Image (spheres, grey):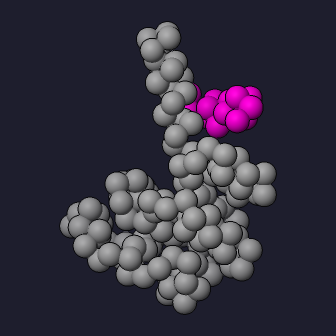
C-alpha cells in the first residue's frame, strides 16, 4: 500500500516505522524537519517538510496515488481539515483522523470521517482495567462514548 502520514510525532513515527517494516510505501509530512529524527536511520520512506492542509504539499507527498491517509498531528483542526481535503479533493479511499475531543470525533464520524479518539479509548481501557483487572478491546470504546449522552 501507498500510505501518507501527516504528523511525525510519537504516533506518526511509530506507525510509519511499523508500516515501512511491513513493506508498504510510506511518505510522512511534518512542519518541523527535526521531527523526522524519530524515524531512525533504518526508515527509508519519504519525508516532506510542510503543512498537511496545503494541496501542493499533499501533491508532493504523492496523495494522488495514496491508498491510505493518516492524520495524527497534535491539532484536531489540522487533522480534520487534512482528512476532509484528502477525502473530498483527492478521493483517497481510506482516511483516518486522530481527534482528541470526543464530541468533535463523534460529529466528524457522523460526516463520514473515520476518527480515532484516543481520549475515549484510553478512558475506556483504564476503566475496564480498574474494574476487572483486564484490558478491553479498543474498538469497544468509541461507540460507548455515544451512550454517555455528552
How many numbered discs, if any? 0
Residue 18 vs 78, above or below: the answer is above
- Residue for point 36% across, 60% down: 9
- Residue for point 71% across, 55% down: 108
Determine which quarter of the picture holds residue 66.
bottom right
Residue 76 image offset from top left, x and y in percent: 55, 59
Residue 52 vs 38, above or below: the answer is below
- Residue for point 71% across, 80% down: 89
Asked whether residue 43 appears in the rendered view, the answer is yes
Q: Quadrant of the C terminus?
A: top right
Residue 141 lies in the magenta-colored region: yes
Residue 135 image offset from top left, x and y in percent: 48, 21
Q: Which secondary structure dominates the residues rendered in magenta?
A: helix
Asked whether residue 20 appears in the rendered view, the answer is no
Q: In which quarter of the image is the N terminus?
A: bottom right
Query: Which segment did they paint magenta?
Result: 137-150
34 relative position to 94: left or right: left
Determine which quarter of the picture holds residue 148.
top right
**Which one is nearer the viewer's eye here, 7 or 94?**
7
Residue 67 image offset from top left, x and y in percent: 62, 68
45 relative position to 58: left or right: left
- Residue for point 66% across, 61% down: 94
Amino acid at each position: 500500500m501507498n500510505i501518507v502520514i501527516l504528523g511525525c510525532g510519537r504516533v506518526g513515527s511509530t506507525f510509519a516505522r511499523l508500516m515501512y517494516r511491513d513493506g508498504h510505501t510510506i511518505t510522512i509530512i511534518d512542519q518541523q524537519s527535526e521531527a523526522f529524527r524519530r524515524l531512525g536511520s533504518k526508515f527509508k520512506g519519504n519525508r516532506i517538510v510542510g503543512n498537511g492542509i496545503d494541496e501542493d504539499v499533499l501533491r508532493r507527498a504523492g496523495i494522488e496515488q495514496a491508498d491510505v491517509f493518516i492524520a495524527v498531528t497534535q491539532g484536531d483542526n489540522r487533522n480534520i481539515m487534512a482528512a476532509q481535503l484528502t477525502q473530498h479533493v483527492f478521493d483517497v479511499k481510506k482516511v483516518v483522523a486522530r481527534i482528541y475531543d470526543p464530541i468533535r470525533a463523534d460529529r466528524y464520524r457522523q460526516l463520514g470521517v473515520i476518527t480515532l479518539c484516543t481520549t475515549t479509548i484510553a478512558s475506556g481501557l483504564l476503566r475496564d482495567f480498574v474494574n476487572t483487572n483486564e484490558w478491553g478491546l479498543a474498538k469497544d470504546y468509541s461507540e460507548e462514548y455515544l451512550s454517555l449522552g455528552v
